[in-house]
Amino acid sequence: MTTKKDTSQYLIICAESLSDARHLLGVAVPLAASLRHKGLILLSCASDADSWIGEAGIPYVALRCPWREALGALHSTFHGILALAVRNPHASRRSITHPATLLRTFRDCRIAYLTIPAVNGTAPRLDTVALTLDHSRESKEKVIWASYFARFVGARVTFYHHCYSDPLLLTRFQNNTRYIEKIFTAQGLTFALTELPAEQRGFFLRRRLAQFSNPDPAALAATEGLFIMQTSDPRERGLAALLPPPERHLLDRKNPILILNRRDDLYILCD
């Protein structure tokens, strides 16, 4: 008996070279099978793509246009539900694999993109998923993608959060927790809530201030598996938008990281 692929939706492998494509295929093939057998498409905008792209052994598209233009159309032109890209902090800034260039190149992408460290050997772990529970928003897209990995990949999901003492922040946190319970319980899935530790020196003041800070760096440091994060919204950063985005330094770690751009028209898988 053969399983029919859902060729109406695709994982899009975005690669600049054959070696990067093969590296990503090691992750994309089993992941596509887990996500109800989605199709695979190899996409490249590299100038030499025509010389190697056919050797990867999957359907491919070589485009002669800027990467940003192609990535902005993944959802409509290619029916993509997830993009995959290599992440290499040692690459040239001209390469889309460099974290700063990757964030800039993918910022118009309207689907989630899974970034895989450019390290051969042990396959990236997708059976353990971590993300943060933010007091300021439900981060619905992050929660839904976490539930997909729990449901289709069998991953253990942990939500990291600050210890909230401020009454307003605590209320928002509790509302967000109820949203997670609703999503996961409806699918018969389990998850863990883990409080991030506060620094011991100046304990009470640091804990009080910590609840207003971004929990992503501490949460990422606490996991070896997949981390799900959202990009910052430049509209909310004011003059800080002239500086590198705060999530830039998170991409130097060796975790696979699923990134969701913060935008109103983000497409997510609905299965």
Image (cartoon, rainbow, N blue to C red):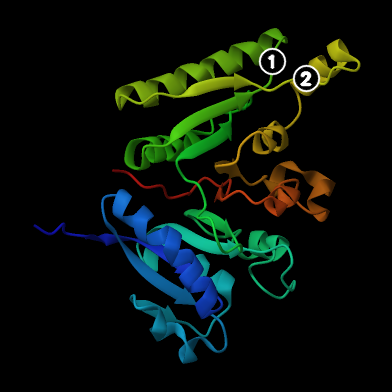
Q: Secondary structure at mark 2?
A: loop
Which residue is label 2 attached to? 198
Q: Measure the C-alpha gap from mark 2 to mark 1.
A: 8 Å
The part of the image, by quadrant, that contains residue 118 is bottom right
Above or below, 165 relative to 2: above
Name the residue: 45% across, 22% down. 179
Of the residues under marks 2 and 1, which one precedes in the sequence?
Answer: 1
Would you say 173 lies left or right of 36 here? Answer: right
| Quarter of the N terminus within the rendering | bottom left
Name the residue: 35% across, 26% down. 189
* Residue 151 at x, y percent in the picture: 34, 36
Amino acid at pointer 2 = Ala
Q: Are marks 2 and 1 in contact (CB under 8 Å)?
A: yes
Q: Is residue 51 visible?
A: yes
Closer to the camera: disc 2 or disc 1?
A: 2
Q: Nearer the viewer, residue 29 or 144?
A: 29
Above or below, 2 relative to 55: above
Mark 2: few/some/many CA within 10 Å (<14, 14-19, 20+): some
Mark 1: few/some/many CA within 10 Å (<14, 14-19, 20+): some
Above or below, 129 relative to 241: above
Kindly give the residue lying farthest to the front in the view shown.
Answer: 121
* Residue 64 at x, y percent in the picture: 52, 85
Amino acid at pointer 1 = Cys
